[in-house]
Amino acid sequence: IKPTFPDATPFPLETAELAFLADVRDGLSRPQKALSPKYFYDAAGSALFEEITRLPEYYPTRTEIGILDRSGPEIAALLPTQAALVEFGSGSTVKLRRLLEHLDTLAAYVPVDVSGEFLRAQAEALSGDFPSLRVEPVVADFTRDFDLPGSLDGLPRAGFFPGSTIGNFEPAEAEDLLRRFGRILGQGAHMIVGVDLVKDPATLETAYDDDAGVTAAFNLNLLSRINRELAGRFDPAAFAHRAVFNSQASRIEMHLVAREEQAVLIGSDTFTFAAGETIHTESSYKYTAATFRALAERAGWTWLTVWTDPEALFSVHALRL
Ligand code: AVJ
């Protein structure tokens, strides 16, 4: 497939870009246009997300770190000694480092991520800072089954899934994912999961629509990424960022709203937008301690306990298989 700018030469796409193109075509052909939030995180998007985590309005990151700091000794006491800690979608190791302060008996740390390059860089930096820690990175897509390295055989396993990443999945998918983590980790495993809590809509909507416009830029970067990688012709200025709490579904929805009627060329396809039509770019599900406990139990886990912050903004759950 050779997407073509109307006024430029065609260029061939790499395998990853072809999968992106297929998803974009499919998503923009639906009655409610949609794009997967997993495509937010190219280099520009990852930098914008880092910026989001430092915004005054975006409470989840700093609140979860506070919980890990305060409840670290209890979390450590609950996990088996000499365990292999498997982090699903490791990204940056900021939270793992906070947990490590309390885990002096970890046998191995196993970061799992699709981006091999980023993973190796993070693993090397971590080994430099914790020379005695065994770090065994695994390049894998955690939404598919994969095997842990055989070198971990015999070690008790604990999974770590912070950041409310689970909130990006539809509840039925989140349940499947937790069941999959159980399969990967094996019987007897523990799991530590960070989950954002339901709260008043104003606090939620502000967290996803900050005054500095960083979240808007993060959302709009998806259109720029399509332009860069798929020969798209989006005018990002022709779209507005919108964040709304859908209380029925208990989720924050991010949309890109067409400011006016328009047709947009992507490769050799044209997609039309009515004025006010939206692309649904992200759902971020919010749970209560009880609704997340129920979800984990449906996925076959035994729920052990939950830690939260004084304002009950965020939760960290402990599960056992
Ligand atoms: C990375 C999925 C946890 O849902 O809060 C932040 C992503 N989107 N601001 C979230 C996000 C807009 C974030 N997660």
Image (spheres, grey):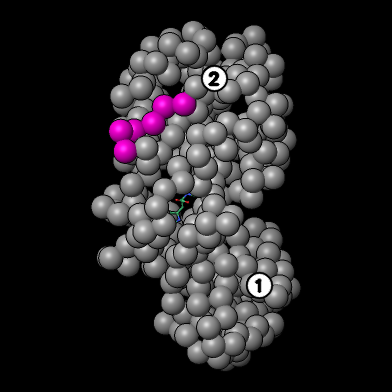
Between the C-alphas of marks 1 and 2, the distance is 39 Å
Work out whether 290 lies above or below 101. below
Whether the residue carrying mark 2 lies under 8 Å from ligand 1 is answered with no
User: Disc 1 designates what residue?
Assistant: 32
Residue 251 sits above or below residue 269 on the image = above
**Quadrant of the image containing the C terminus:** top right
169 or 94, which lies in front? 169
> Could you tell me the amino acid type at mark 1?
Gln
Q: What residue did someone put label 2 on?
A: 304
Q: Which quarter of the image is occupied by the N terminus?
A: bottom right
Residue 169's mark? none
> In the rendering, at what x and y percent does residue 249 appear?
59, 55
User: On screen, 64 above or below 190?
Assistant: below
Question: Mark 1 near mark 2, Cβ–Cβ under 8 Å?
Answer: no
Image spot of residue 6 (x, y percent) = 61, 90
Could you say whether the residue bearing mark 1 is in a helix, strand or loop?
loop
Which amino acid lies under the numbered mark 2 shown in the image of this protein? Leu
* Residue 244 falls left or right of residue 292: left
Instruction: Name the residue located 64 percent from the left edge and 46 percent from the top edge.
Output: 171
**Earlier along the polypeptide chain: callout 1 or callout 2?**
1
Q: Position of residue 255 (x, y in %)?
A: 51, 69
**Camera-nearest residue between 207 and 108:** 207
Q: Residue at x 52, y 10 (%)?
A: 80
Looking at the rendering, which quadrant does residue 95 occupy? top left
Residue range highlighted in magenta: 306-311
10 Å crowding of disc 2: few (<14), some (14-19), many (20+):
few
**Where's residue 115, x and y in %?**
55, 45
Q: Is residue 169 at least partly visible in the picture?
A: yes
- Within 10 Å of disc 1 (Cα), the crowding (few <14, some 14-19, many 20+) is few
Residue 131: image quadrant is: top left
Does the magenta portion include 307?
A: yes
